Image: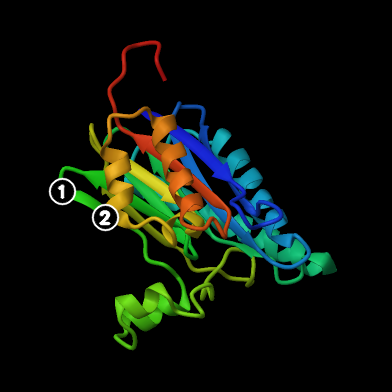
């Protein structure tokens, strides 16, 4: 298994409120995370940074996760703890009032991947069936789309596209989506913030992932495309490819 993480400030924003990374636990299993912070007075980067730091700490001290139900339980328990921490921090610090973050995260083992998400950061999979989005956005526009009130074309350019119905840290209790999929040799996962998904369409994402380029070059190409198309937001992504590698490789 190979993985890469990349983040970019974009062409417009004065600072980067996205966070993410790829981390190993005691068993050598990977957790990939992308978090897109929000809130005034730079509180967005506080929220995404806290979420990442706490999830990383929890994961690096975890072990014995071998089955999908264990991975799903791990997400439910630890994302709930992170939500509680962020919510209390925001209430105790006036400058962080209302802060929150999206989160999309994946635990990857050799025969499955478990994905958790809150907000509109996304996870896609490329496999023998094609390229598709696994997660559902917790956004006003996606809810209007799902209920048939607007068309997909309307959704692309909706003026309230950035309005989230769920975020990590903004409420005392949080709902998350958690699911498990088969993850097999030759498959790839793409986790990203909306700075990528709002700019680069799925056809282009799939073309980049299918290319023979290195993982680092694929990530750089996706970031470059988002910037070419405007780069109005921070751009963050993680790619994980299930590739058998020789002993000694990572």
Q: CA distance from mark 2 to mark 1?
A: 9 Å
Q: Return the residue at label 1.
A: 129
Mark 2 secondary-structure assignment: strand
Q: Return the residue at label 2.
A: 132
Q: Residue drawn at (52%, 48%), measured in percent from left and top?
A: 236
Does 39 sit above or below residue 110?
below
Tell me if residue 43 can be seen.
yes
Q: Residue drawn at (47%, 64%), measured in percent from left and top?
A: 120
Q: Residue furthest bottom?
A: 149
Whether label 2 touches label 1, CB < 8 Å: yes
Q: Residue drawn at (26%, 45%), measured in percent from left and top?
A: 126
Residue 40: quadrant of the picture = bottom right
Mark 1 secondary-structure assignment: loop
The percent coordinates of residue 24 (x first, y second) are 50, 31
Quadrant assignment for the C terminus: top left
The percent coordinates of residue 153 (x first, y second) are 32, 76
């Amino acid at each position: 298994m190979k993985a890469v993480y990349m983040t970019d400030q974009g062409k417009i924003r004065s600072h980067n409120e996205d966070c993410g990374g790829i981390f190993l636990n005691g068993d050598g299993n990977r957790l990939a995370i992308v978090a897109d912070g929000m809130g005034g007075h730079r509180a967005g980067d506080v929220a995404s940074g806290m979420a990442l730091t706490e999830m990383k700490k929890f994961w690096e001290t975890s072990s014995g996760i071998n089955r999908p139900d264990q991975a799903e339980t791990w997400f439910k328990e630890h994302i709930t703890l992170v939500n509680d921490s962020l919510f209390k921090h925001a209430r105790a610090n006036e400058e962080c009032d209302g802060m929150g973050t999206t989160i999309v995260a994946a635990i990857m083992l050799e025969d499955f991947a478990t994905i958790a998400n809150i907000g509109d950061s996304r996870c896609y999979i490329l496999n023998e069936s094609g390229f598709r989005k696994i997660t559902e956005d917790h956004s006003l526009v996606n809810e209007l789309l799902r209920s048939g009130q607007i068309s997909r074309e309307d959704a692309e350019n909706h003026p309230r596209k950035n309005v989230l119905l769920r975020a990590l840290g903004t409420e005392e209790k949080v709902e998350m989506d958690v699911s498990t999929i088969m993850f097999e040799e030759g498959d790839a996962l793409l986790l990203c913030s909306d700075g990528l998904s709002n700019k680069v369409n799925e056809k282009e994402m799939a073309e980049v992932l299918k290319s023979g380029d290195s993982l680092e070059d694929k990530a750089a190409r996706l970031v470059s495309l988002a910037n070419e198309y405007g780069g109005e937001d921070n751009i963050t992504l993680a790619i994980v490819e299930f590739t058998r590698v020789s002993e000694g490789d990572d």
